[in-house]
Amino acid sequence: SGFNWSQLSGKTLLDVGGHQGKIMSLVASKYPEIKCQCFDLPEVVSSVTALEGVELLGGDIFDGDLPSCDVIFMKHFLDKTMWNEEQTIQILSSCRDTLPDDGQIIIAEAVLPDDCVNASGANRLHLYVDVLFLLVGREAARTETEWTSLVEKAGLRVDWITATSAPSCYMIVLSKA
């Protein structure tokens, strides 16, 4: 939930860091008119069997060898615990450079509210989840303002952010600035 996948009909969707392609397989099964690809390190791609409707592609995002596509998807790939700010900007910039002018980046990540004191509903639940992560030594998730600042540094803009049914997963949709 949180994104209308049918709007990608006829387009190529690339999951960066998608491991064996389970998410793309789910998208492909429901929307066969979307060409679904999964991009991960060569050693990851070579160790898994391709799922139906998904093309597995190996490479390194830091080498700038992302395959051509219309839309890039990343789920829990840009978490603060995985990459520092400079690396995250480099990843986003590489994605931007790969996309056509009307391309999009869809990020499924945690987004904390800027106003934590007055958070309610899904935002409040996400705060509790984030506190649990902090207790086990992880960094806090990014706020909406932090996400906006980060993507702007990569030459992108936030089109919209929306909650999903999972408290640690929002859909952040980006386009070229």
Image (cartoon, grey):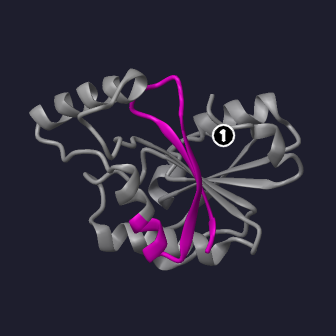
Quadrant of res 80: bottom left
**Is residue 170 highlighted in magenta?**
yes
Residue 22, horizontal then vertical, whole percent:
59, 34
Image: 169 above or below 14: above
Residue 67 shown left or right of residue 157 in the figure: right
Residue 125, horizontal then vertical, whole percent:
33, 23
Residue 82 shown left or right of residue 109 in the figure: left
Q: Residues within 10 Å of mark 1 (few under 14, many from 20)?
A: many
Residue at the spot 47% in from the left edge and 59% down from the top edge: 41
Q: Nearer the viewer, residue 80 or 115?
A: 115
Asked whether the viewer can see residue 46, the reply is: no
Image: 77 above or below 128: below
Residue 156, horizontal then vertical, whole percent:
56, 71
Residue at the spot 76% in from the left edge and 36% down from the top edge: 28
Residue at the spot 30% in from the left edge and 61% down from the top edge: 83
Residue at the spot 78% in from the left edge and 56% down from the top edge: 12
Residue that label 1 marks: 24
Residue 1 shown left or right of residue 135 in the figure: right
Q: Amino acid at mark 1?
A: Met
Image: 133 above or below 140: above
Q: Which residue, as the protein is rendered here, is positioned at the far front?
A: 118
Residue 136 shown left or right of residue 1 in the figure: left
Q: Which portion, as a residue range, is magenta? A: 149-177
